[in-house]
Amino acid sequence: MSEKSVIQNQLKQLKTKLDASINARSQIEDDFNKRSILLTEFIAKLSRLCKGLDLELDNRLAKLRALLKKAAPLPDIEKEITNLSKLLNKQASKNENNIRNMHNEFHQAGAMLQKAKGLPPQARRELRSLLTENTESKDALIQYVPKLSELLSIYSEVVAAKDNIKVSGKDFAATNGNSAHTNNIDLASYINKFISILNGITLSDKQQQKLNKLKSDFANSSSMDETLLSKIVEVFNIVAADMEQERKTAKTFLSTLSGALSKVQRAVKSTITDSDEQKELHEKINQKLTIQIGEMTSVVESATSLTEAKAELNDKIEGIAQTVEAKSLNELEYFTSLEQQLKTMQLKVIELEKQSQTFEKRLIEQQQKSMLDALTKLNNRASFDEHIAKQMVRYHHKPFELAIAVLDIDDFKRINDTYGHTAGDKTLQVIASTLVKSLDDNVFIARYGGEEFVLVFDSLSYGDLMVALDSLRNNIAKLPFKFKNNKVSMTTSIGVTHIRKGDNIHKAFERADQALYQAKNKGKNQVIYSQ
Ligand SMILES: Nc1nc2c(ncn2[C@@H]2O[C@H](COP(=O)(O)OP(=O)(O)OP(=O)(O)O)[C@@H](O)[C@H]2O)c(=O)[nH]1
């Protein structure tokens, strides 16, 4: 083999090693890309979950997403993640404060009730055990705060009324001899007020069943006795049990979230350290290579004969080959360790994804629940407000046959008074399901409150609307209700109007309500259209 071909051969081998080294390098780059995609996905998920919690948190997450999108340097990303962690902690302590206030409110009201005179012994015992059980502050749900406060104030009102009734009952009895009558009137209004509050509470399925049972027991109570007060205490217990459950779920989720975030933070940090060390090592190897190549050039320049040059060049090429080999080896090690980290991170993201899916599902369920009426399972008033607001926006953008109908059950009070509240509830449920069965799927149906329903039609002209509503009215009138062996028929009055140019929700609703009023005045069981 000639000297030239030996050198060519060695150069060829050298080139193959350099190619391998370039390949390893591009694999590392791919790996970096995969990592940042994972991190981006993670942050996107985090943003979705935290959306609306806090404006600053939303902004910080948006900033982090922007950094990831433009592939900003890792230290910048790490800094932003640290800020985010701090903010999440701040958010958590803000929540804690709210909860602590709520907790104090709960206890103050409880203490006040304990002082109330004439509290039956059983209710007093249960109240005491409720307060003792709840001495520790909870991570309870803020949305229950107003409901609980309302319940508490009603509870105190009932207790106060109980005392007043006793006193005024005596006075009344002295002059009139009819204290029982006064008692019943006050009791009915408290029961109605209390029931309408209970209707606004939506709990988990298990606790909701208990609450519904209590609601009907409560409605059937006829005297301000010990059982009635102990039932109110039971309502507290049920709500408190649901709050406890909610607290546990939220706590687990938040700790998983912050755990996952700190793991990601650690992974990003270790990537930075790794890549810094890697950079240093590469620089050293490159320096060594430059020196070795420089030495090769000076060998060629100072060589006096080809043989001398050949021997020296062989040595130098050997040296360079070893350096390149060391470089590839080092890159391979780095690649393997990165791959390992990537796998770990992938697992963490999968785990987090599962957790966030469960949490998201729960949030959606809760949101849906809060848009449904607990008794009839129809949309509730909040849901109607949201629906009609959207329809009005659509209408003002491009008018269409949008109509609102208000439907009210005739003489409903009679059912409650004659057959009891449970019969009244059952009637509401049967009428609700008749509305669903009688109307097309595209009609929006909601329980507006009490015995009043609201319907939204989005494609019927006057004639078709009146046919649909009259047939609905007829279907309800034909329902074969039977209470305490008596056949009872129920009728409804309906007021309806189309939305006009220049209408707002309030004006249109008022017009439908006026039409309903006319229907009632003209003898009930009819549909009146307002122009
Ligand atoms: N059972 C039951 N009754 C309810 C509920 N919400 C409201 N009510 C009762 O519905 C009745 C409504 O009575 P009124 O407003 O006098 O109306 P009405 O008897 O239907 O009379 P008209 O509307 O004039 O035909 C009251 O007795 C309320 O207590 C509920 O969720 N369940």
Image (tube, grey):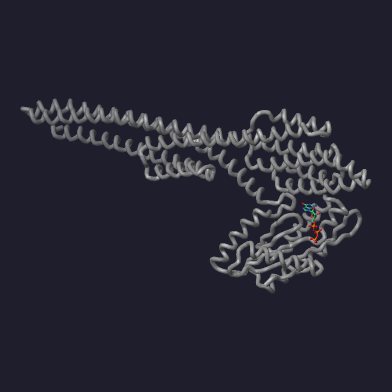
Q: Is residue 8 left or right of residue 88?
A: left
In this rendering, the answer to whether 185 lies above or below 329 is below
Q: Is residue 377 left or right of residue 56?
A: right
Residue 76 visible here = yes
Residue 4, quarter of the rendered image = top left
Q: Which residue appears at 73% of the width and 71% of the height? A: 467
User: Which percent across, then down, holds residue 322?
Assistant: 25, 27
Count every numbered label the image shows and give the total. 0
Q: Which residue appears at 67% of the width and 63% of the height? A: 509
Q: Is residue 426 left or right of residue 10?
A: right
Indicate which quadrant contains ligand 1.
bottom right
User: Which percent across, then down, holds residue 339?
Assistant: 41, 33
User: Which percent across, then down, holds residue 211?
Assistant: 76, 42
* Identity of the residue furthest to the right in this view: 177
User: Which percent across, then down, holds residue 257?
Assistant: 53, 35
Q: Name the foreground residue: 443 vs 293.
A: 443
Residue 344 visible here = no
In this rendering, the answer to whether 196 lies above or below 253 is below
In this rendering, the answer to whether 172 lies above or below 431 is above
Q: Quadrant of the N terminus?
A: top left
